[in-house]
Amino acid sequence: MQDKVLFKVSLIISVMGTFLVLLILEYSEVKLTEINSLGKNQLETRVKVQGAIVSIKETPGLYILTIKDTSATIPLVIFKEDTLALEKNTQVEVIGKLTEYKKELEIIVEKIKI
Amino acid sequence: MIIEIIIAVLIGVVGGIFSGLTPGIHTNLLVTLLFSISPFLLAFTSPLIISALIVSMAITHTFLNVLPAVYLGAPDSEGKVLSVLPGHRMLLQGKGYEAVTLTVLGSFLAIIMGIALTPLLLKFLPALYSSIKNYIGYLLVIISIYMIFRERKKFWAFFIFMLAGIFGIGVLNLNMKEPLFPLLSSLFGVAGLLISLKDNVKIPQQLITKIEIPKIEVVKAMSSAGIVGTFVSLMPGLGPAQAAIIGSQIIKLTDKGFLILVGSLETLGMVTSFIAITSINKARNGAVVVISRLMETITQKDLIIFLAVALASGLIAVFLSLRLAKIFSSLITKINYQKLCIAIIILIIVMGFWLSSYIGLFVLIIGSFIGMLPSLVGIGKNHLMGCLLLPVILFFLL
């Protein structure tokens, strides 16, 4: 295949493919879930939960928070970029990846809002 | 404890060989796997030993990954010299072994340099970080603009940076497992292999002779690495390729010097990330993230152990890399290069599907087409790092 043809094909597929990725993203909004309905079948996927902070722990590079909703509690892992401006009992909404550590589910936080 | 550390170093080296030699496999993938089985491992050993294993694996990876980078994905260099990486250029001149040797030399010197700089970094990194932390987003914008403006074809450099960036934002936000694997292995792996196939590249006979190490280039490359490496270790999203371009602008280097610089920056980045977690509490890569999960605190004594592990695994990795480079150099002309490229593409596709399902395959296909654009246009592949840089820039600026 000539370089010019390959270039045009690559350009069209690249632009259309990127547009398609954004389109899939637009139509795949993460739905709010109760903590106790999170299951291992959702591992490594993105989830959204709400709850009040019940504990805050710190490791060298991370904050580990636990939040509680009406159904259960779950730990949240947050990478340290800035100082964490959150306190106990603050109500937060979190989007992040559901993972498992020591047989317990936890969320690696991507977005957190009060 | 010493015996446990030695065992951890050896297991880590084996992991690093696997991840370094397999195109598309990043240490993060193995480290995540290790983290998931760490509760089981912690029944037999301590978090420090598992962390030492991770350090050994991550350091070995930075040495061994030069082999697929040099021996695979080489384009036909005729007429597009500027966009061909120095490692590939040397491979096509029959000097693949020399390219690996120079990169490995850079990596090993980076460990020595990292250890020598540790007292200084522990003292000054917090002040350096606090002075730039509010400007990280702007600094990344300036670096990206600089990269674009140094290209002859500025429009295409900008276009490909933005396209890769928007693609990266989309993929990283899709609800899929392991998005980084299909994203990075398509842009930087499959695309290069497809270009090799298209160009029907013939790898010439490889020379394994005594290599003259250009001392002045070593001094220049390592000086550049010292200046740029420290700065870049504080900047998320920047890889060794961008760092090397910045470094080679500060101090002009030949291809040989550039290879020493690339090797040194990758390893130095890893070594300084262990120092950064101790001094500024920032995890700059997946290996350090897991270490910071395993260890409640990281003391200076732990850091000394990590640096000793880095040195030990680095020594083993030097021997392994050079030995394997000799084997690769003799095999690469005996096997069918086209079939090898196809086999590796199939391996990446299978892994992409296994890790990220159908959506992973979709990302692999689109990413491969985007990844071919720089070679087809005739600009550097470093603009593809927009896939990580743009999301990081937006994170810091918005």
Image: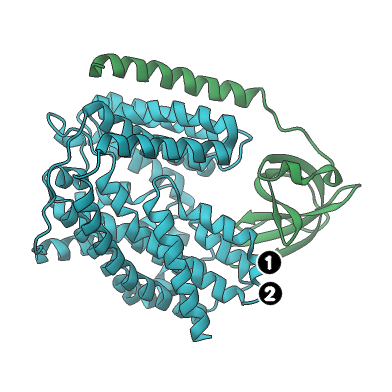
Chain colours: A green, B cyan
In the image, what residue occupies the spot 49% across and 85% down? B2
Q: CA distance from mark 2 to mark 1?
A: 7 Å
Image-based side of B390 in relation to B95, left or right:
right
Q: Which residue is mark 1?
A: B39
**Disc 2 residue crowd, few under 14, some 14–19, many 20+, Cα 10 Å:** few
Residue B187, position in %: x, y? 39, 35
Residue B322, position in %: x, y? 24, 63
Mark 2 residue type: Ala
User: In front here: B89 or B324?
Assistant: B324
Mark 1 residue type: Pro
Quick one: SS at disc 2?
A: loop
| A93 relative to B109, above or below | above
- Say which quadrant the N terminus of chain A sits in: top left
Residue B240, position in %: x, y? 33, 51
Mark yes or no: residue B252 visible. no
Q: Which residue is mark 2?
A: B43
Are discs 2 and 1 less than 8 Å apart at CB? yes
